[in-house]
């Protein structure tokens, strides 16, 4: 019997040094969506997309494995989802080429990512310019209905939708399903140790898989301001782990004692993160599971995308 659930597709770039901002801001919601049982999910590591900015073979290999381990450690169940690596499935780049041939330069020049790069006077590589075509292929190969992404990716989904329509119209076919963006609810921005948005580029992060000592070091480094009633930067991070009522009581009890409050935060962070960290460390020790998961994903994704490519090749007249 065929599975009638709507297909969900999304890609994650293999960025390293994950922090609790990434977790609370995106990764956690993502895993929840795959667990709901409402969709048929395909999640892949967008390594060919990352190639535009990461051109170091060792780093690519390492970060790819890390991101797979990270998702498994935070609870992505490989039985619920086809989890694979983009570069393992040649249909993605093949279809991207076909899309290139029906898309105009002025159309792609209107993409935000391209315009931003241009405004910064960056030398833009062709891969960056074509980024939305590869992304359209990622999505359309699997007949995705639902594409969960952050707000910044919305335009890319619209481009994928336009591309599906253009292909169907050009070749008088209905090979491609039109996808819809699913904008993940904006979670409050997780603040970093200096009170700004937590970001690896600001050096203000609390690492997601840090040891207790690393967590303690990051927390002790939280910038506190003695002018207010309570250390706001500590409080705002702490709020991720406790209810307001509970936290207010704790902060009242230790009013002015920043050290005690930071120690309480370290305790809460460690308690919350330890199970995920333990799993992550286990995978690092024995990463055969990463190979297994990716091998399974590759096989499934290849079979499905190849069937779609046969329809595409017939539609364009090369088969
Ligand atoms: P960074 O800013 O550390 O480079 P990325 O840009 O790689 O992080 O973000 C990856 C994902 O994590 C994005 O979906 C983003 O929305 C989410 N994210 C990153 N930092 C935060 C934060 N401080 N608060 C909430 N979400 C965040
Ligand atoms: N461009 C996305 C990002 O930067 C990653 C991505 C690549 C993606 N292909 C995709 C997301 C297909 C959703 C669907 O985060």
Image (cartoon, rainbow, N blue to C red):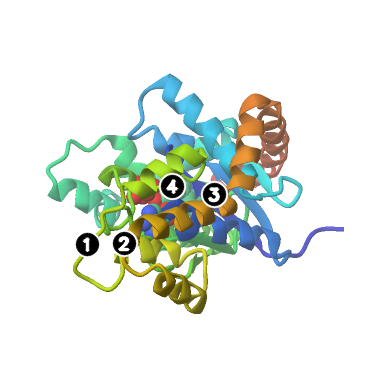
C-alpha distance separating marks 3 and 4:
14 Å
Q: Secondary structure at mark 4?
A: loop
Where is residue 195? Give x, y as percent: 27, 59
Q: Is mark 4 within 8 Å of ligand 1?
A: yes
Q: Which part of the image, by quadrant, shows the C terminus? A: top right
* Residue 51 in the image, given as x and y percentages of width and height: 39, 32
Circles 3 and 4, Cβ within 8 Å, touching? The answer is no
Residue, disc 2 = 233
Q: Kindly identify which residue carries mark 3.
A: 270
Q: Which residue is identified by label 1?
A: 225
**Residue behind label 3 places its C-beta within 8 angstroms of ligand 1:** no
Q: Which label sits in the foreground, 3 or 4?
A: 3
Depth check, mark 1 against mark 4: the one in front is 1
Between discs 3 and 2, the one toward the N terminus: 2
Asked if labels 4 and 1 touch by Cβ distance under 8 angstroms, the answer is no
Q: Position of residue 218 (x, y in %)?
A: 37, 45
Q: Earlier in the sequence, mark 3 or mark 1?
A: 1
Q: CA distance from mark 1 to mark 4?
A: 24 Å
Callout 1–callout 2 Cβ contact below 8 Å: yes
Q: Specify whether residue 189 is in view.
A: no
Camera-nearest residue between 283 and 301? 283
- According to the picture, the residue beneath numbered tag 4 turns out to be 19
Bin the neighbour count of mark 4 within 10 Å (Cα to Cα): few under 14, some 14-19, many 20 and up. Answer: many
Query: Residue 284 versus residue 295: which sits nearer the camera?
Result: 284
The Cα atoms of the two marked residues, 3 and 2, are separated by: 18 Å
| Residue 288 in which image quadrant | top right
């Amino acid at each position: 019997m065929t599975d009638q659930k709507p297909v969900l597709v999304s890609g994650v770039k293999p960025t390293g040094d994950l922090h609790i901002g990434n977790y609370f801001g995106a990764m956690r919601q993502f895993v929840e969506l795959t667990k709901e049982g409402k969709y048929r999910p395909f999640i892949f590591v967008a390594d060919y997309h990352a190639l535009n900015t990461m051109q170091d073979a060792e780093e690519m290999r390492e970060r790819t494995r890390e991101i797979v381990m990270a998702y498994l450690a935070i609870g992505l169940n490989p039985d619920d989802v086809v989890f694979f690596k983009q570069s393992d499935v040649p249909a993605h780049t093949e279809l991207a080429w076909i899309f290139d041939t029906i898309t105009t330069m002025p159309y792609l020049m209107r993409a935000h990512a391209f315009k931003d790069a241009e405004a910064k006077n960056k030398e833009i590589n062709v891969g960056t310019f074509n980024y939305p075509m590869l992304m359209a292929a990622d999505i359309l190969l699997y007949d995705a209905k639902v594409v969960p992404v952050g707000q910044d990716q919305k335009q890319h989904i619209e481009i994928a939708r336009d591309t599906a329509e253009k292909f169907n119209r050009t070749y008088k076919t209905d090979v491609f399903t039109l996808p819809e963006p699913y904008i993940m609810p904006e979670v409050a921005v997780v603040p970093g140790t200096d009170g700004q948005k937590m970001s690896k580029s600001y050096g203000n992060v609390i690492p997601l898989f840090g040891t207790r000592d690393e967590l303690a070091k990051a927390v002790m480094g939280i910038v506190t301001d003695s002018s207010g009633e309570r250390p706001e930067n500590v409080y705002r991070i702490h709020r991720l782990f406790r209810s307001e009522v509970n936290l207010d009581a704790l902060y009242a009890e230790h009013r002015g004692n920043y050290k005690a409050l930071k120690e309480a935060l370290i305790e809460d962070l460690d308690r919350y993160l330890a199970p995920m960290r333990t799993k992550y460390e286990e995978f690092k020790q024995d990463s055969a599971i990463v190979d297994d998961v990716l091998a399974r994903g590759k096989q499934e994704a290849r079979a499905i995308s190849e069937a779609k490519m046969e329809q595409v090749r017939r539609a364009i007249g090369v088969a």
